[in-house]
Amino acid sequence: MPIVKTSIKGQVVIPKIIREHLGIKSGGKIMLKLVGNHAEITSLPADPIKYLRGILKGKVSLADELLEERKKDNEIDEKNCI
């Protein structure tokens, strides 16, 4: 486990092996999260929209479910009106 020093501005250099493992590139963004008495580093994608594209693929569409439910409700209403 590497130990690093902080600069006068509070900056640290993340060791190369950790940067490579997390996929942190020069100029890339990371998120620091305070958890209890330590911090967690998470690498953020360069293009969040592209990264999230397709994440819901194959999932049930809420809009489709609502349309199906509305169709069933309409059928019930039509039966009750006759």
Image (cartoon, rainbow, N blue to C red):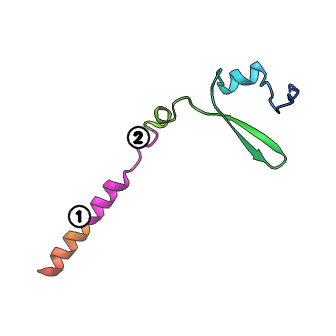
Q: Give the quadrant of residue 4.
A: top right
Residue drawn at the location 43% of the way across and 37% of the way down? 54
- Name which residue type carries label 1: Lys
Q: Is residue 57 above or below residue 13?
A: below
Q: Is residue 69 above or below residue 23?
A: below
Find disc 1 in the rendering and name its residue.
71
Q: Is residue 63 left or right of residue 37?
A: left
Query: Is 6 in front, or is 24?
Result: 6
Q: Is residue 42 left or right of residue 72?
A: right
Q: Position of residue 6 (x, y in %)?
A: 86, 29
Q: Which residues are magenta?
A: 55-71
**N-term mark: 1 or 2:** 2
Q: Position of residue 5 (x, y in %)?
A: 88, 27
Asked whether 49 falls inside the magenta stretch, the response is: no
Find disc 2 in the rendering and name its residue.
57
- Name which residue type carries label 2: Lys
Residue drawn at the location 16% of the way across and 76% of the way down? 79
Residue positioned most to the bottom: 81
Residue drawn at the location 47% of the way across and 36% of the way down? 49
SS under mark 1? helix
